[in-house]
C-alpha cells in the first residue's frame, strides 16, 4: 500500500511541475511553447531532478539526480568513480557490485534515489591510502583476474562473502560467488584468493 | 642478483595488477572528456528489407537530445561513397555500411543513433524512434540452407583439399561417419563494446576504443574517412576482454564518429549486453561431418572432414575449421571441404581458437569414437598415429612435445582409473567418465617494432603499440626486457595501447609475445650493445661475450672492478637518454623450413547425474606445449581461462535464434549461460616448458588459442565414457542425456 501512495504522490508532483512550468513557459514565449508538440516533456524536464544525499567512500554528497538514474550510472558518469563496472545493466553479471551500508548490491539494479542516506563503498574506497585491502592483495598474489574488468565486482563480492559467513569452504565460495561472472575464467584463483583472506582471519 | 620471478620463466605478478584491483585501470568508456554526450542505438525490428520511413521527430524533441542520426541525415563517409566498406583494411573495416542506405541485413542492425546530454535521456529518446519497413523474406537457419554453401573466395587455404585418395575411410576395415554441430557462441567479454569519439578539427579524429589493435583501428578509421593515418589517434590502454570480437572495427564505431561530427562534441557509445549478441560478432554455428577409417590395429587410413559455416550476407568470413585435420595425425588419405553459408545475420568474427576450436570438436570426438570402435585406449590410438613430421607440408616440427603432454596429463588426472567400457563406473551416486582431447594452433609471429629507451636515471622505457586484452602482455614484455637488460622490473615501464607508438600487430592468433616480445628483445639487445660500446674503458677490454648484465650494470665476471652502470654510461657520454627503435620479424626462409605449432591436451573427469543428466566437470588438467613460458603465473591463468571457456562451449553456451523472426531469443546472461564460479572445478595447468629453437628469440609459442582448443571435445568424450551417450551437438545439456 505504501508504494502505491508514493506513486500517487509522485504523479501529482509531476503534474504540478508540468502545470506550473507550463504557465511560466507560456508567459515567457507562448507562441513557441504551443507549437512544440512535446512542450510538456521539455518544460518539465529541468524539474525532474530529485535531491539525494549519499555518502560514498566516506565522502558526503548532496546531489540532484533524475529518478531513473541507477546507482551505477551515478557513480560512473556523475561521480567519475569508474572502478565500478557496467557489464550487463540487468543484474546478471555482478561487475557493478558495491556495498550499501556494508552489504553487497548490484548497483545497476539499484535506482540511486533508493539509496538516500546510505553509505556506499566502491572498489576505490577499500584500500587505506597505499595499503591495499587484504582482498586486493590476495587477488594480486593468486592472479585472480586477467582483463580486470570484473575484478572490482569480484573483490567487493568476495569481501561480502566473508562478512556473510559464506566462505567456509571452497564449494561454498564457488556457490556464493556465482553472481559474479568472469569471462576470462579466473574462477579457481578467485576462490584461492578469497580462501586465503578468510583463513588469514583479518577483519574485512 | 637477478630476481628469478622477474626473468623469463618467472612468476611475477602483473605490472598493472594494482590498477586493476583498485579500480584505477581506465577502460575506453571511462575517460573524462569535456562536453561529452551519449549515444544510444536503435535496432531494426525486421531481419531483411529496407527502411521505408523513419520517424525521429519525437526523439528529436525529447529533452536533452542533440541529434538522431539515420541514413537520411548522416554525414557522408568517403569509403562508403566509394563502396569500399567491405574491402577496407583487409576485412577489418566496418563491412556493413550502416547509416549509409536504407538496407537492413539482419535483425537488430542499428538504424538510428540517438545522441543526448545524458545516458538516461538518450536511452529514453531511442525508444521513441519508429520505423516502417519494406520487409523481405529472411533466411537465418543454417541447417535449412546448407545447400547454399559457397567455396570461400577470400581464403585460399580453405579451398577443397585432398591428399592421397578421396574418402578412403569408406573402404577401411573399421570406419565411421558422423555429424557434429556447434551452435552459435558469443564472445561476451565482461566489458561492453563501444567507442568514445571526438573530432579535433575538420580532418582529425581521436577515439578511445575497445580494440585488439590500436594500429588496426587507426588504419581502418583513416581508410574509412580517407584521412592520413597520423590524423587519427587511438587510445586503448585497458581492454576488458575481447576474445576476438575487437579484431575489427564495427559499423557502430563508425556511426559514433559520424554522430560526433554531427553534434560537434565528443560522443560515447556503450552498447548493451543484448547488442553484444546482435551487432558485434560471434563464433559461427557450424555443421561438420567427419568420416574416419582405420585398420583393425588402429592405423588410420583415411579421414574426410566437411564444414558448413554460418555467415552474413554482406561479406565473407572464414576460419580454419578443417585445418587441424590435415596434420594432427599421420594419415595418408585426407580430404577437406569448407563452405560458407550466407544468411541474414551479422557477420561472425574470430572467437578464441577460431576455427580450430570448432574443428577440434569434430576431429577429436571422431578420434575418440574410433578408439571405442577399435576397443583401444584413445591415448594409445593417438600415439599410434602420431606424425613424426608435419604430414601436410612434409616439414619437420619446430617442436612437438604432444606425446610428453599425453603422459603428463594422464598421470595427473588418474587416467589409469578410467574404464574403457562406457557407463561402467559410479562414484557418490554419479556416473564417472574420463575424457581427453588434443588441440593445436599455428605458432605465429608477425613483424613488430619496439622502442627501448635508457633514461639518465637508469630506468628503462619500452614502447610498442601492442594491446593487452587480459593475457598479461605488459607483464611478459617487462620480463623480457628485464632479462635482456638485467634491470629490476620496477625500473622498467612498458607503454602500449596508443596508436602513436611503434608498430605492433593486432592481439590475435596468440602471437603477441612472439611478435612484440621479439621486437622488445631485439631492441633491448641492440640498446645493451650500444651501451657497451659507449662504456669506454670502464669494462677494461673484457670480451663482449663474457659480459654480464645485472642490477642495471654491465660487468665482467672475471674482474670485479670492471663494471659500470647504464646510468653512468649515459652520464660519461653526456647523454640524457639513449634510444633504439627496432623492427623484428621471422625470416621467411625459417618459416618454409619448419612447421610451427603450439599444442594443447585437455584431460577431464566428469560426474553425470543418472536421473537428471546434469554434467559436472569434477577435475580438469590443461597442458600446453607452448615452448618457453615467459610468465608461469599469467600463463597458468590463461590456460585455466581457456579451459573455463571450453566448459561453456561443451555444456551451456548456445545463442538461439527464433527463425520465424530472425531474432535472438536468449541474448543476455540470464538465458545464455557462460560458466559461473560454481561450474568450474580445480584446474591443474601443466607446461611442457621446452624452448622451441626456431620460433623466436625467447623460444615461445602462442598460448591464448590452444587454451580452449580441445577442451569441449575432452568433456564430450568424458560424458560418453560416463554414460555411453555420444552427444554430437553442443552444448551437452541434460535433455540430451536422459
Image (cartoon, coloured by chain):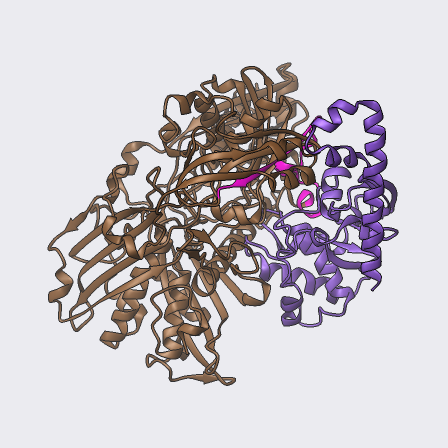
Q: Is residue B498 visible?
A: no
Q: In terms of depth relative to the viewer, which is nearer, B545 or A173?
A: A173
**In-image side of B120 versus A60 (left or right):** left
Q: Total label count?
A: 0
Whether B34 is among the magenta residues is yes
Q: Which color is chain A depicted in? A: purple
* Colour chosen for chain B: brown
Q: Nearer the viewer, residue B498 or B529?
A: B498
Q: Quadrant of the N terminus of chain B?
A: top right
Vertical relation: B417 (above or below) B353 = below
Image x and y of residue B263, in percent:
62, 23
What residue span does the magenta drawing correspond to? B18-44
B667 horizontally vs A122: left or right: left
Looking at the image, which residue is at 88% across and 51% down? A117
**Is residue B737 visible from the viewing direction of this image?**
yes
Q: x, y (%) of residue B141? A: 34, 54
Amino acid at each position: 500500500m505504501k508504494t502505491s501512495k508514493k506513486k500517487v504522490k509522485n504523479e501529482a508532483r509531476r503534474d504540478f511541475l508540468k502545470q506550473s512550468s507550463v504557465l511560466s513557459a507560456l508567459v515567457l514565449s507562448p507562441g513557441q511553447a504551443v507549437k512544440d508538440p512535446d512542450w510538456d516533456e521539455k518544460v518539465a524536464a529541468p524539474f525532474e531532478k530529485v535531491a539525494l544525499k549519499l555518502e560514498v567512500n566516506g565522502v558526503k554528497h548532496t546531489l540532484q539526480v533524475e529518478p531513473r538514474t541507477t546507482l551505477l550510472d551515478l557513480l560512473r558518469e556523475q561521480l567519475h568513480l569508474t572502478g565500478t563496472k557496467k557489464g550487463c545493466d540487468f543484474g546478471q553479471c555482478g561487475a557493478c557490485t558495491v556495498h550499501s551500508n556494508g552489504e553487497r548490491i548490484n548497483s545497476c539494479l539499484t535506482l540511486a534515489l533508493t539509496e538516500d542516506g546510505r553509505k556506499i563503498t566502491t572498489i576505490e574506497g577499500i584500500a587505506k591510502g597505499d595499503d591495499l585491502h587484504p582482498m586486493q592483495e590476495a587477488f594480486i598474489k593468486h592472479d585472480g583476474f586477467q582483463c580486470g574488468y570484473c575484478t572490482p565486482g569480484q573483490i567487493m563480492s568476495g569481501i561480502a562473502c566473508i562478512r556473510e559467513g559464506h566462505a567456509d569452504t571452497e564449494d561454498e565460495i564457488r556457490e556464493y560467488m556465482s553472481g559474479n561472472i568472469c569471462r576470462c575464467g579466473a574462477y579457481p584463483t578467485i576462490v584461492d584468493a578469497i580462501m586465503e583472506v578468510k583463513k588469514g582471519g583479518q577483519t574485512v | 642478483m637477478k630476481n628469478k620471478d622477474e626473468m623469463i620463466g618467472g612468476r611475477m605478478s602483473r605490472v598493472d595488477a594494482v590498477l586493476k584491483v583498485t579500480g584505477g585501470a581506465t577502460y575506453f568508456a571511462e575517460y573524462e572528456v569535456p562536453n561529452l554526450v551519449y549515444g544510444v542505438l536503435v535496432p531494426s525490428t525486421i531481419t531483411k528489407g529496407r527502411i521505408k520511413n523513419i520517424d525521429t521527430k519525437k526523439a528529436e524533441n525529447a529533452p536533452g537530445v542533440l541529434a538522431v542520426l539515420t541514413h537520411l541525415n548522416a554525414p557522408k563517409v568517403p569509403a562508403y561513397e566509394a563502396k569500399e566498406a567491405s574491402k577496407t583494411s583487409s576485412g577489418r573495416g566496418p563491412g556493413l555500411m550502416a547509416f549509409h542506405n536504407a538496407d537492413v541485413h539482419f535483425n537488430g542492425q542499428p538504424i538510428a543513433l540517438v545522441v543526448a546530454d545524458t545516458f538516461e535521456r538518450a536511452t529514453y529518446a531511442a525508444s521513441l524512434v519508429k520505423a516502417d519497413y519494406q520487409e523481405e523474406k529472411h533466411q537465418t537457419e543454417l541447417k535449412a540452407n546448407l545447400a547454399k554453401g559457397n567455396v570461400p573466395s577470400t581464403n585460399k587455404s580453405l579451398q577443397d583439399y585432398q591428399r592421397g585418395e578421396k574418402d578412403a575411410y569408406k573402404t577401411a576395415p573399421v570406419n565411421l561417419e558422423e555429424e557434429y554441430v556447434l551452435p552459435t557462441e558469443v564472445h561476451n567479454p565482461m566489458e561492453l563494446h563501444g567507442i568514445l569519439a571526438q573530432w579535433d578539427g575538420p580532418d582529425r579524429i581521436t577515439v578511445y576504443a575497445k580494440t585488439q589493435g590500436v594500429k588496426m583501428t587507426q588504419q581502418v578509421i583513416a581508410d574509412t574517412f580517407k584521412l592520413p593515418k597520423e590524423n587519427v589517434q587511438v587510445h586503448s590502454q585497458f581492454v576488458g576482454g575481447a576474445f576476438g570480437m575487437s579484431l575489427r572495427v564495427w559499423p557502430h564505431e563508425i556511426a559514433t564518429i559520424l554522430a560526433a561530427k554531427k553534434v560537434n562534441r565528443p560522443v560515447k557509445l556503450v552498447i548493451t549486453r543484448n547488442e553484444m549478441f546482435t551487432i558485434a560478432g560471434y563464433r559461427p554455428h557450424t555443421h561438420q561431418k567427419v568420416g574416419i577409417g582405420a585398420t583393425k590395429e588402429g592405423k588410420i587410413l583415411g579421414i574426410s572432414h566437411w564444414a558448413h559455416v554460418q555467415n552474413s550476407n554482406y561479406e565473407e568470413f572464414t576460419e580454419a575449421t578443417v585445418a587441424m585435420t590435415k596434420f594432427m595425425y599421420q594419415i595418408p588419405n585426407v580430404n577437406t571441404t569448407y563452405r560458407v553459408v550466407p544468411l541474414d545475420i551479422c557477420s561472425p568474427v574470430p572467437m578464441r581458437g577460431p576455427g580450430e576450436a570448432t574443428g577440434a570438436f569434430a576431429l577429436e570426438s571422431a578420434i575418440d569414437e574410433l578408439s571405442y570402435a577399435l576397443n583401444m585406449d584413445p591415448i594409445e590410438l593417438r600415439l599410434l598415429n602420431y606424425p613424426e613430421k608435419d604430414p601436410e607440408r612434409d616439414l619437420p616440427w619446430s617442436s612437438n612435445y604432444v606425446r610428453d603432454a599425453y603422459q603428463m596429463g594422464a598421470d595427473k588426472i588418474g587416467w589409469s582409473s578410467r574404464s574403457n567400457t562406457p557407463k561402467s563406473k559410479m562414484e557418490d551416486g554419479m556416473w564417472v567418465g574420463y575424457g581427453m582431447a588434443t588441440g593445436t594452433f599455428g605458432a605465429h609471429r608477425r613483424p613488430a617494432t619496439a622502442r627501448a629507451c635508457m633514461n639518465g636515471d637508469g630506468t628503462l622505457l619500452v614502447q610498442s603499440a601492442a594491446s593487452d586484452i587480459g593475457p598479461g602482455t605488459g607483464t611478459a614484455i617487462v620480463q623480457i626486457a628485464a632479462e635482456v637488460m638485467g634491470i629490476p622490473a620496477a625500473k622498467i615501464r612498458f607503454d602500449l595501447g596508443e596508436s602513436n607508438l611503434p608498430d605492433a600487430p593486432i592481439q590475435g592468433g596468440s602471437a603477441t609475445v612472439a611478435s612484440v616480445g621479439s621486437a622488445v628483445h631485439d631492441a633491448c639487445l641492440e640498446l645493451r650493445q650500444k651501451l657497451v660500446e659507449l662504456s669506454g674503458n670502464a669494462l677494461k677490454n673484457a670480451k663482449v661475450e663474457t659480459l654480464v648484465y645485472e642490477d642495471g650494470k654491465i660487468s665482467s665476471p672475471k674482474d670485479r672492478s670492471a663494471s659500470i652502470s647504464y646510468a653512468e654510461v649515459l652520464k660519461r657520454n653526456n647523454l640524457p637518454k639513449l634510444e633504439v627503435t627496432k623492427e623484428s620479424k621471422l625470416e621467411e626462409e625459417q618459416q618454409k623450413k619448419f612447421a610451427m605449432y603450439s599444442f594443447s591436451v585437455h584431460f577431464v573427469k566428469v560426474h553425470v547425474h543418472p536421473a537428471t543428466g546434469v554434467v559436472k566437470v569434477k577435475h580438469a588438467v590443461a597442458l600446453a606445449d607452448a615452448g618457453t613460458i615467459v610468465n608461469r603465473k599469467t600463463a597458468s591463468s590463461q590456460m585455466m581461462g581457456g579451459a573455463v571457456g571450453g566448459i561453456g562451449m561443451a555444456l551451456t553456451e548456445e545463442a538461439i535464434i527464433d527463425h520465424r523472426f530472425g531474432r535472438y531469443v536468449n541474448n543476455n546472461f540470464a538465458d545464455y549461460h557462460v560458466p559461473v564460479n560454481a561450474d568450474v572445478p580445480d584446474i591443474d595447468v601443466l607446461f611442457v616448458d621446452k624452448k622451441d629453437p626456431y620460433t623466436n628469440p625467447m623460444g615461445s609459442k602462442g598460448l591464448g588459442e590452444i587454451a580452449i582448443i580441445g577442451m569441449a571435445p575432452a568433456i564430450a568424450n568424458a560424458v560418453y565414457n560416463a554414460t555411453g551417450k555420444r552427444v554430437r551437438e553442443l552444448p551437452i545439456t541434460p535433455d540430451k542425456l536422459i
